Image (spheres, rainbow, N blue to C red):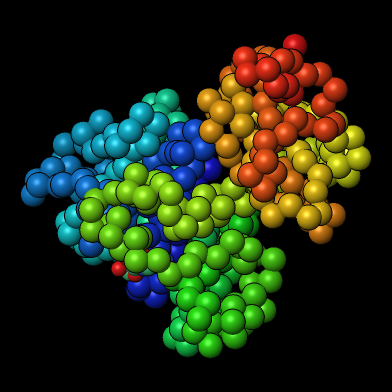
């Protein structure tokens, strides 16, 4: 279970929008996801169309140290779709700060909650934490429970101002953790027509260097509309550029995650790169690869995704495109779509004729 906090003490920089749509795009890529609304304003909750009546148990009841009757996960967790759950919040969560203030280990309430959740076999692939716009107890709990943090940055002078503060918080936190928190930064609400946008992009990159995602979330009114309709962008407008932005972000994130997991001597990038012949079986799926310096988009479609193309990510200047897909089948047909043109995999010798008289690439794993 990988826990990702979306945090920045500044309000309005896209934490909630990113929490909702990052979760939705992980789910779109067949990951099992829990979104935890840690903001008493409950924007993620209502942004996904969840209603919480007064008295309905929410994340507050699960975290609060002064509950007479324990609240169960089932009472709180709402299922939006199979494998996409949310722990909602409401204004009651404001009380936690005061209640927990004088407790020892009050910064570990959320971490302990997740440990209990896993003990009860309620595991997820990813848990996303939407943090409130301050560095109080709730954000502190989130950062302590998280493996990683994504810091959304919206291009304005004031947002740059706050970056020192959040970076300092993460550094202080790392002194008390066994493994350092992995930091990512994300440019959101980006309008490339504004003259200062590029300048701010450069400043943010100078601050975060490789931690800054290459993917940028552009300003798009559909993200506001989707939230107002109580839907993620994956539901509201799956054909929109805003959906593509968030999907690209998740793919880039998964590639980073996967980079870290790769055992370096046996299957380092060099080996993968040198021996790239056809799809490869990896620990969490099948790696698809394609080589092209000139293509501007490469997708893969096959039996495993009902022939709905999924984008590969360009990894480097040599034109290596890659994507890992969770594939259930031991044998499958597939094709690449390069700039819209369907073609067989040039590095896979096995092919099979399809019902339309053409050829599909074919792979089999024992
Ligand atoms: N990429 C974007 N394009 C257009 N509007 C956006 C975008 N990202 C966020 N917004 C809008 O900006 C406002 C603040 O975003 P939100 O995600 O709620 O920030 P935070 O949770 O950090 O306070 C919301 O009205 C949201 O709909
Ligand atoms: Mg918010």
Q: Position of residue 176 (x, y in %)?
A: 57, 60
Q: Classify residue 305 as left or right of residue 66.
A: right
Residue found at x 61% / y 57%: 182
Q: Which is more toward the observer, 186 or 130? A: 186
Query: Which corner quadrant of the image does residue 304 belong to?
Result: top right
The residue sitting at the right extreme is 274
Q: Classify residue 118 as left or right of residue 88.
A: right
Q: Classify residue 54 as left or right of residue 286.
A: left
Q: Which is more toward the observer, 94 or 238? A: 238
Residue found at x 23% / y 53%: 229
Please say whether residue 32 is visible from this viewpoint. yes
Q: Position of residue 213 (x, y in %)?
A: 61, 62
The residue sitting at the top extreme is 366
Residue found at x 43% / y 49%: 239
The residue sitting at the left extreme is 54
Query: Which corner quadrant of the image does residue 71 belong to?
Result: top left
Q: Is residue 363 above or below residue 87?
A: above
Quadrant position of the C terminus in the picture:
top right
For the image shown, how many numbered marks are present on the structure? Answer: 0
Q: Is residue 187 above or below residue 347?
A: below
Q: Position of residue 283 (x, y in %)?
A: 69, 29
Q: Classify residue 112 as left or right of residue 332.
A: left
Q: Is residue 303 above or below residue 246?
A: above
Residue found at x 62% / y 66%: 212
Q: Position of residue 227 (x, y in %)?
A: 28, 57
Please say whether residue 107 is visible from this viewpoint. no
């Amino acid at each position: 279970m990988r826990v990702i906090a979306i945090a920045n003490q500044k309000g309005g920089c896209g934490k909630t929008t990113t929490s909702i749509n990052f979760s939705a795009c992980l789910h779109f890529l067949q990951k099992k996801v829990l979104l935890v609304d840690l903001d008493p304003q409950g924007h993620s909750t209502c942004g996904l169309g969840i209603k919480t009546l007064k008295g309905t148990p929410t994340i507050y009841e699960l975290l609060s140290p002064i509950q007479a009757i324990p609240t169960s996960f089932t009472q709180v967790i709402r299922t939006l779709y199979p494998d996409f759950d949310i722990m909602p919040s409401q204004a009651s969560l404001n009380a936690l700060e005061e209640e927990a203030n004088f407790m020892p280990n009050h910064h570990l309430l959320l971490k302990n909650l997740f440990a209990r959740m896993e003990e009860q076999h309620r595991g997820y692939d990813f848990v996303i934490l939407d943090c409130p716009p301050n560095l109080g107890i709730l954000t502190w709990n989130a950062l302590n429970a998280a493996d990683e943090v994504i810091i959304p940055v919206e291009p304005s002078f004031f947002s740059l101002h706050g970056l020192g503060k959040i970076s300092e918080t993460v550094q202080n936190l790392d002194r008390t953790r066994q493994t350092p928190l992995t930091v990512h930064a994300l440019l959101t609400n980006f309008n490339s027509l504004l003259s200062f946008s590029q300048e701010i992009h450069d400043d943010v990159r100078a601050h975060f260097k490789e931690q800054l995602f290459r993917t940028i979330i552009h300003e798009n009114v559909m993200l506001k509309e989707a939230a107002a309709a109580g839907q993620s962008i994956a539901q509201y407008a799956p054909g929109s550029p805003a959906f593509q932005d968030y999907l690209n972000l998740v793919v880039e994130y998964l590639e980073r995650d996967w980079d870290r997991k790769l055992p370096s001597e046996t299957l380092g990038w060099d080996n993968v790169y040198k021996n790239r012949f056809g799809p490869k079986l990896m620990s969490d799926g099948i790696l698809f690869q394609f080589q092209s310096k000139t293509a501007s988009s490469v997708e893969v479609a096959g039996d495993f995704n009902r022939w709905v193309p999924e984008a590969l990510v360009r990894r480097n200047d040599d034109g290596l495109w890659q994507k890992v897909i969770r594939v259930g089948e031991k044998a499958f047909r597939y094709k690449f779509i390069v700039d819209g043109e369907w073609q067989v995999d040039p590095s896979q010798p096995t092919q099979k004729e399809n019902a339309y008289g053409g050829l599909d690439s074919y792979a089999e794993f024992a």
